[in-house]
C-alpha cells in the first residue's frame, strides 16, 4: 500500500469516526430538546416546535449509521461501499445544511412568537400551564407579580410556601432563552457535521477511484 493510499484510507476512517460522534451529538441534542419542550407541545399552535428536534434526532441516527458504513468501506477498500457512502454523505450534507439555515432564519420568528403562545395558553389553561412552570422553573408568563394576584402555585418556586419574593422569573424570557440556546446549538452542530461530511465524501471518492484503478491494473 502506497503512502498516499494509506493516508487517504485512514483519514477517511478517522473522519468517519469523528463524524459518527457528531451524529450522536446531534441525536443527543434532539432528544434533550424534545424532552424539555414536551409540555409546550401540548399547545395547539406550538406543535411546530417539534420539527427541529425530531429532524435532528432522525438525521443524527442516520448520520451515525452511514458513518459506520463508511468506516467499513474504508477498511475493506470496497469501491461500491465507498461510492454509495460518498453519495449519501453529499445528500445528508445538503439536508443538514438546509436544516441549519432554516433554524437560523426562523429562530427569531420562534422567539418572537413564544410570549404570544404562552400568554394565550396561560389564560385558557392556567392549571395545565403549571406543567410548563415545573419543567422550566418559571412562574407564569411574566412572573408571579404580574401573572398571579393571589394563590401563587407551588410550581412557581423551589419550596413552598410560594410568594412573590421567592418565586421564579416569568416563563416568557426563560423559554425564549432555552430555544435560543438549543436552536443555536443544533444549528452549529449541523454545520460542523456538514463540514465533516464534505471531507468524508471527497476522501471516499478519492479512495474509491484508487481502488477502482488498482483493480483495473490487477487484471492486466
Image: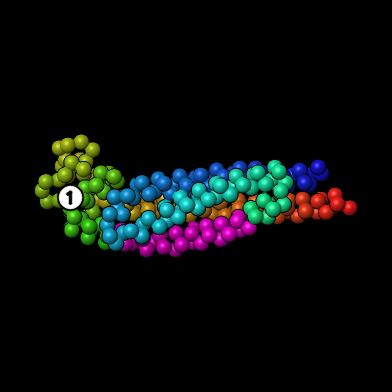
User: Looking at the image, which residue is at 60% across and 55% down?
Assistant: 89
Judged by its main secondary structure, the magenta piece is helix
Q: Which residue of the protein is positioned furthest toward the right in this rendering?
A: 220
Badge 1: residue crowd in 10 Å (few <14, some 14–19, many ≥20): few
Whether residue 102 is in magenta: the answer is yes
Residue 173 visible? The answer is no
Q: Is residue 147 a member of the stretch shown in magenta? A: no
Q: Position of residue 202 (x, y in %)?
A: 68, 55
Report the magenta residues as a range: 86-114
The extreme left residue here reads 150
Q: Residue furthest top?
A: 159
Quadrant housing residue 180? bottom left
The residue under the point 50% across, 49% down is 60
In-image side of 74 versus 45 (left or right) = right
Q: Is mark 1 on a helix, strand or loop?
A: loop
Residue on which disc 1 sits: 127
Q: Where is residue 192 in the image (x, y as percent from the top left)?
A: 55, 51
Q: Is residue 160 left or right of residue 211?
A: left
Name which residue lies at 72% across and 46% down.
Answer: 77
Q: Taking the image as drawn, is residue 211 in sight?
A: yes
Which of 21 and 144 lies nearest the eye of the viewer? 21
Q: Would residue 214 be found to the left or right of residue 122 on screen?
A: right
For this rendering, which residue is in front, 86 or 183?
86
Image location of residue 171, percent across then percent down = 27, 51
Numbered label tally: 1
Residue placed at 58% from the left, 49% from the top?
A: 66
- Tell me: residue 106, above or below residue 135: below
Q: Could you tell me residue 44's position as x and y percent?
A: 28, 60
Q: Which of 132 and 60 is in front in this view?
A: 60
Q: Left or right: where does residue 184 sit relative to residue 74? A: left
Amino acid at each position: 500500500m502506497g503512502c498516499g493510499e494509506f493516508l487517504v484510507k485512514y483519514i477517511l476512517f478517522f473522519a468517519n469516526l469523528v463524524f459518527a460522534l457528531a451524529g450522536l451529538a446531534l441525536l443527543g441534542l434532539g432528544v434533550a430538546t424534545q424532552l424539555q419542550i414536551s409540555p409546550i407541545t401540548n399547545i395547539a399552535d406550538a406543535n411546530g416546535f417539534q420539527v427541529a428536534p425530531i429532524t435532528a434526532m432522525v438525521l443524527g441516527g442516520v448520520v451515525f449509521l452511514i458513518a459506520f458504513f463508511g468506516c467499513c468501506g474504508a477498511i475493506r477498500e470496497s469501491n461500491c461501499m465507498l461510492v454509495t457512502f460518498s453519495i449519501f454523505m453529499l445528500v445528508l450534507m445538503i439536508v443538514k445544511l438546509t436544516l441549519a439555515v432554516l433554524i437560523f432564519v426562523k429562530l427569531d420568528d420562534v422567539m418572537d412568537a413564544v410570549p404570544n403562545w404562552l400568554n394565550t395558553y396561560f389564560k385558557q389553561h392556567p392549571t395545565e400551564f403549571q406543567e410548563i412552570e415545573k419543567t422550566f422553573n418559571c412562574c407564569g408568563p411574566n412572573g408571579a407579580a404580574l401573572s398571579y394576584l393571589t394563590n401563587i402555585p407551588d410550581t412557581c418556586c423551589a419550596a413552598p410556601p410560594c410568594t412573590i419574593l421567592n418565586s421564579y422569573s416569568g416563563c416568557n424570557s426563560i423559554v425564549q432563552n432555552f430555544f435560543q440556546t438549543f436552536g443555536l446549538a443544533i444549528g452549529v452542530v449541523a454545520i460542523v457535521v456538514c463540514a465533516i461530511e464534505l471531507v468524508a465524501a471527497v476522501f471516499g471518492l478519492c479512495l474509491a477511484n484508487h481502488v477502482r484503478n488498482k483493480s483495473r491494473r490487477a487484471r492486466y
